[in-house]
Image (spheres, rainbow, N blue to C red):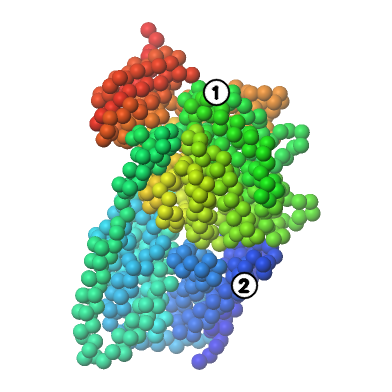
Amino acid sequence: MSVRRPLVAVSAALGLVVVEAVADPTGLLALAGWSGAAPVLASGIWPFAASLVFVPVLLAVVWWAAVRAGERYWTLAAGVVLAVLLAQATACLVMTGNLAASTWAAGYVTAKAVPTGLIVAAFARWFGGRTTRQRFPSGSPLIPAALFAAIAPFVAGLWWTSAAYAPGVPVARADRGPLSLIVAMLLLALVTALCLRWMRARVPGILGGWLAALVAGGIVGLVQALIAFLVDGGLSGDLWPAMAAYVAIADGLSFGACLGWVAGVAALVVERVPAARRARLPLVTSAAIVVASLVVALVVPVALPETAASASEADSAPAGFLRASGRVITDGRGNQVLLRGVNVNQLVDFYQPRPDVPATRPLTEEDFAQIAAEGFDVVRLNLSWSALEPQRGVFDQKYLARITSAVDWAHRHGVYIVLDMHQDGWWKGATTAGTTCRPGTDPMWGYDGAPAWATISDGAARCEFTGRDISPAGDRAFQNFYFDTDGVQSALVRTWGRLAATFGDDPTVAGYDLLNEPGFGETAPVTTSYLLGRYYDRAIAAIRAAGSRQMVFVEPSILWSGLGFDSGPAPAFTSDHDIVFSPHLYAESITMDRSLGLPPIVGIDRQFTLAQRVADEYNAPVWSGEFGYWGSTSDVDARLTRYAKAEDANRLGSAYWVWKQACGDPQNGIGPTGDGLIPEDCATGQDAAPRDDLLTILGRAYPRSAPGTISSLTSSGANVQLAGATRHRSCGLDVWVPGAKRPIIHSTGLANVKTTPDSGGWTVTGCADGSYSLTAAARVSS
C-alpha cells in the first residue's frame, strides 16, 4: 500500500500545528498552543504534554486513519477529528492523572478538531494520489450499537452535566431519572446502529466501528440540542441555543472518541462469531441491556435537590451564622436570607497607572453607614493576596487589621461580609520595558491579585489579547497555580486557613469567596473544572480545619463572566454542604458578545436559569458575586431594571460592582470621574453626585430574611409583594422598604407585624406559622 496519502495527511496535520502555534499567541485557537513560556522540568510533565504527548498521538492516529479510512474524504475527516480528540484526552490524562476529567474535556477542542479534519482530509484528497474506493461487509450493527449504548450510564463521568442539558433533554445519567436514561440509551443505540451500517461498509476493522461511534455521538448531541431548543426557551433573543448545541455535540463527540473502541471491538468480535451462534446474540445482549438499564435507573442513588441531612444541618447552625440549605441561604433558625449589597474594592492592592493618582479610595466606617442606609445587608469585601502576604508565609498585620476594622464596622451597621480573594489578570504586574508583544497582543497595565513570589510565568510575555484576562503570562501563571508549581496553590490554601482562624468565630462574616473569576490557564476545561475544583476542595478543608463554620462561595472561571456560562468545577468536587455557587451574572454587560456587537450569547433572564441549573448539580444556592452595567444612562437603567426584575423572580441575592472606584484604579481608565455608585470627582478627589438612578433600582424594597422559604417576590422602589411558607413558627421576617414616608402594609398569615424607622427607610417585621404574604406600598402624598 502506498504511503503517499498518510504522509500527506501527517504533513498537513503537523503543518497546521506549527502554523497555529506561531500565529496564535494565546493558544486559544491553536491545536497545540505556544505562549512563549519556557518549559521547566521542575514543574513536572504538564509543560511538555503538548509536544511530547499531544503531537505524537495526533500524528499517529492521523496516519492510522489515512491508511484505513483515507480513500474517502468524509471518512478521513472523521478520522482526523478522532485523532485530535484522542490526542487532547491523552495529553490531559498525562497532565492530571484523572481519566474522567480528561476524556470529557477532550470534547472542548471540537472547534479545533472539526476544521482540522476538513483541512487535512482536503490536502490528502488533493495531493494523496489516486483512490480505489472499496466496499466491505458491514455486518450486523445491533449488538455493537447496543453494547456501546449500554455502557453510557456506567461511564458517564462528567459527560452531560453542564447547563446545556435542560430538564426534558434525554441524557444517559442515572441522576436524571429512568425515563431520561432509557430514552437516551435507545437514541444512542439507534443512531450508532445506523452509523455502523454506513461506516463499516467503507472503513473495515476496529476503526470503522470507532468512527461510527464518534459520528453517532455527535449526531446524538445534535438531537439533544434540538430537543433543548424546544424545551429551553428556543429563540429568546440570545445565542444560547447555538452554545448549548456546541456543548452537546462536543460531549457526544468526546464520548464517541474515547469509548467508541467498544463498538469497534464488538463489531469485530460479532463478525467472527460462527453464524449459528450469532443468531442468539441479539436476544442475550438485549436482555443484558434491559437488566443494566434497570439497575442503573432504580438502584443507583439519585441526587435530590435538598437532602434532609443538609436541611437539618442548616437549621441547627449556631445562632447568627448563615448556612447553605439546598437552594437557599438560611440563618440557622428557619429563615431564608437574601444577601443584597455591593462590592467594596477599597482594600485592593491595585496597580497604579499614574503615580500621582491613588488607585483606591479610603475605606471608613462612614462607607458602611451609607451602605446600610441604602438597604444593603452585605458587602463583598475584595482582598488582595499581594497585600495580605507580601512575603511567603508572612502576613502583613497592618493589612489584616484593616480587614478586621472593616468587619467590625459592618457588624455595627448590621451588614454581613463576604471575604473575597480578589484578582484580575492574576497579579499587578504590567508589561515590562523592552517586552516585544507577539502580533495580535498589546502591552498592558497591571491589575491586582497574587504577590510577586507566587507569580510564575516562565518568561511568557505580559501582553493582553482583547483585554486583561487573556495574556500569555497570566495564563501561564494560572497554569502553574492549578498544578501547584513550587507550592503556590498550597500557599494560598494555607492563607485561607489562617484567615478562617482569624474570622471563624465572627458571624458577621457570611463566608469566604475562594478566588475571584479564576483564569482558565492553558488547558481549559481541565483547569477550570477538575483542577479548580481540586483547589476549592483543599481550601475548604483548610477552612474547616481552622474551625470556621461559615459558608464558602465558589465561582466558575472567568469564562462565565465573558460568555454567560461555563462548565465550572465538577459536581461532587467537595463533600462539604455549606457551599454557595457564585457566578458573576454579567450577561448583556461585559460579555464578549457586547464588545463584538453580536446578539447576546446569554440573555439577562436566561443567565439566572443557567446559574440555578449548575447550582442544582452542587445542591447549593446561587448568589451573584458581581454584576453591573456600563454605557449611556438610559441603556444602563433599562438593563439594570431587567436584571432586578429577574433577580426578584428568582428570589436571589447579589453584590453590585462597585461601591466606589478611584480615578487611579486601572479598571477605571482615565476620565473625569471614578466609576461606582458613589463616583469620585477626579479634579478634586472628592465624592461626586451619587448614582441615584442606580441606587433607586438596587435599593428597592426586599426581604432581608423571611420565615421558611420565599415563594414569590416582586419589587420596585418602595413597593414590594412577597409570599412564603414555613413549617415552624418563626419571627424572622425582616423587610427593607426605602423612603422617608411610612409604607402602607397589608399582610395575610402574619402576626405581630411592625413597621419601624431605619436609616434611609423602614424595617417591617413579623411572625409566621405556615403560608403568608405581605404587600408594602409607598404612601402617596395627598
Q: Is residue 529 visible?
A: yes
Q: Secondary structure at mark 1?
A: helix
Among the 4 quarters of the image, the one containing residue 633: top right
Residue 272 position, x and y percent, is 31, 90
Q: Nearer the viewer's eye, disc 2 or disc 1?
A: 1
Q: Is residue 186 above or below residue 530?
A: below
Residue 707 position, x and y percent, is 32, 31
Q: Is residue 152 above or below residue 70?
A: above
Q: Secondary structure at mark 2?
A: helix
Residue 574 vs residue 404: left or right?
left
Looking at this view, is 405 or 652 the one in front? 405
Disc 1: CA contacts within 10 A as few (<14), some (14-19) or many (>=20): some
Q: Is residue 597 visible?
A: no
Going by the numbered disc 2, the residue's amino acid type is Ser
Residue 569's disc is none
Going by the numbered disc 1, the residue's amino acid type is Ala
- Could you tell me which residue is drawn at 68 percent across and 51 percent down? 392
**In the orientation shown, which residue stands out farthest toward the top?**
782
Q: CA distance from mark 2 to mark 1?
A: 57 Å
The residue identified by callout 1 is 369
Question: How many numbered discs, if any?
Answer: 2
Among the 4 quarters of the image, the one containing residue 408: top right
Looking at this view, is 730 or 299 the one in front? 730
Disc 2: CA contacts within 10 A as few (<14), some (14-19) or many (>=20): some
Residue 318 position, x and y percent, is 41, 37
**In the orientation shown, which residue stands out farthest toward the right?**
434
Residue 107 vs residue 431: left or right?
left
- Could you tell me which residue is drawn at 62 percent across and 53 percent down? 491
Residue 178 position, x and y percent, is 25, 60
- Could you tell me which residue is drawn at 33 percent across and 82 percent down? 267
Residue 51's disc is 2
